[in-house]
Image: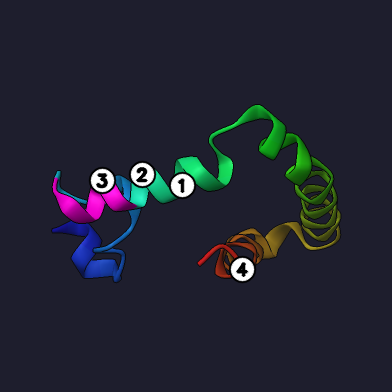
Amino acid sequence: MGGELVGWKHSLPLLPYGDRLRWYRKTFHHSIGDRAILDKYYPIIQMETHIFLRRVLAKPDKLEALMFDSMVYLF
Protein backbone atom coordinates (compact mmCIF):
# COMPACT_ATOMS: atom_id res chain seq x y z
CA MET A 1 0.00 0.00 0.00
CA GLY A 2 2.81 2.44 0.85
CA GLY A 3 4.36 1.90 -2.56
CA GLU A 4 1.07 2.72 -4.25
CA LEU A 5 0.79 5.99 -2.32
CA VAL A 6 4.18 7.24 -3.49
CA GLY A 7 3.98 5.81 -7.01
CA TRP A 8 6.50 3.00 -6.47
CA LYS A 9 4.03 0.14 -6.74
CA HIS A 10 6.20 -1.64 -9.32
CA SER A 11 9.60 -1.11 -7.66
CA LEU A 12 11.54 -4.29 -6.94
CA PRO A 13 11.49 -4.24 -3.12
CA LEU A 14 7.74 -3.62 -2.97
CA LEU A 15 6.55 -6.21 -5.49
CA PRO A 16 4.51 -9.17 -4.28
CA TYR A 17 5.85 -12.59 -5.22
CA GLY A 18 4.74 -13.53 -8.73
CA ASP A 19 5.67 -13.44 -12.40
CA ARG A 20 6.61 -9.76 -12.43
CA LEU A 21 8.93 -10.13 -9.42
CA ARG A 22 10.62 -13.18 -10.95
CA TRP A 23 11.12 -11.29 -14.23
CA TYR A 24 12.56 -8.24 -12.40
CA ARG A 25 14.93 -10.42 -10.37
CA LYS A 26 16.09 -12.31 -13.45
CA THR A 27 16.70 -9.07 -15.37
CA PHE A 28 18.46 -7.46 -12.40
CA HIS A 29 20.71 -10.47 -11.92
CA HIS A 30 21.52 -10.54 -15.63
CA SER A 31 22.50 -6.85 -15.51
CA ILE A 32 24.29 -6.59 -12.17
CA GLY A 33 24.39 -10.07 -10.66
CA ASP A 34 27.98 -10.91 -11.53
CA ARG A 35 31.09 -9.39 -9.89
CA ALA A 36 32.69 -8.80 -13.30
CA ILE A 37 29.67 -6.80 -14.44
CA LEU A 38 29.62 -4.84 -11.18
CA ASP A 39 33.32 -4.03 -11.63
CA LYS A 40 32.42 -2.58 -15.04
CA TYR A 41 30.04 -0.09 -13.40
CA TYR A 42 32.32 0.78 -10.46
CA PRO A 43 33.98 3.85 -12.08
CA ILE A 44 30.57 5.32 -12.90
CA ILE A 45 29.26 4.65 -9.38
CA GLN A 46 32.37 6.22 -7.87
CA MET A 47 32.17 9.30 -10.11
CA GLU A 48 28.45 9.86 -9.43
CA THR A 49 29.02 9.43 -5.69
CA HIS A 50 31.74 12.09 -5.73
CA ILE A 51 29.51 14.47 -7.69
CA PHE A 52 26.66 13.93 -5.22
CA LEU A 53 28.88 14.47 -2.18
CA ARG A 54 30.36 17.66 -3.64
CA ARG A 55 26.83 18.98 -4.15
CA VAL A 56 25.89 18.08 -0.57
CA LEU A 57 28.98 19.87 0.76
CA ALA A 58 28.11 22.94 -1.29
CA LYS A 59 24.43 22.99 -0.26
CA PRO A 60 23.86 20.86 2.88
CA ASP A 61 20.48 22.50 3.49
CA LYS A 62 19.26 21.09 0.14
CA LEU A 63 20.03 17.44 0.97
CA GLU A 64 16.52 16.15 0.30
CA ALA A 65 16.31 17.85 -3.10
CA LEU A 66 19.79 16.61 -4.03
CA MET A 67 18.85 13.06 -3.08
CA PHE A 68 15.70 13.26 -5.17
CA ASP A 69 17.62 14.64 -8.14
CA SER A 70 20.13 11.79 -7.87
CA MET A 71 17.42 9.14 -7.61
CA VAL A 72 15.58 10.39 -10.69
CA TYR A 73 18.40 9.00 -12.84
CA LEU A 74 17.89 5.53 -11.37
CA PHE A 75 14.33 5.12 -12.64
Label 1, on which residue?
28
Q: Label 2 is placed on what type of residue? A: Arg
Name the quadrant containing residue 55. Answer: bottom right
Q: Is residue 45 magenta?
A: no
Tell me whether the residue at label 3 lies in contact with that at label 2, contact meaning CB atoms closer than 8 angstroms.
Answer: yes
Q: Along the polypeptide, which appears first: circle 4 or circle 1?
A: 1
Label 2: which residue? Answer: 25
CA separation, marks 4 and 3?
24 Å
Q: Earlier in the sequence, mark 2 or mark 4?
A: 2
Q: Which residues are magenta?
A: 18-23
User: What residue is shown at x 65% (from left), y 59% (from top)?
Assistant: 63
Q: Residues within 10 Å of mark 4 (few under 14, many from 20)?
A: few
- Does 42 appear above or below 70? above
Q: Secondary structure at mark 4?
A: loop
**Residue shown at 27% from the left, 62% from the top:** 10
Residue 73, numbered circle: 4
Pair 4/3: label in front: 3
Tags 1 and 3 touching, CB below 8 Å? no
Say whether residue 72 is left or right of residue 42: left
- Relative to 52, is 63 on the left or the right? left
Q: Give the residue at mark 3.
A: 22
The Cα–Cα distance between marks 2 and 1, rounded to whole angstroms, is 5 Å
Lateral position of residue 20 relative to residue 61, left or right: left
Q: CA separation, marks 3 and 2?
A: 5 Å
Marks 4/1: CA distance? Answer: 16 Å
Q: Cβ–Cβ below 8 Å for labels 2 and 1? A: yes
Q: How far separated are the C-alphas under marks 1 and 3?
A: 10 Å
Crowding near the residue tagged with mark 3, few <14, some 14–19, many ≥20 C-alpha atoms within 10 Å = some
Q: Quadrant of residue 26?
A: top left
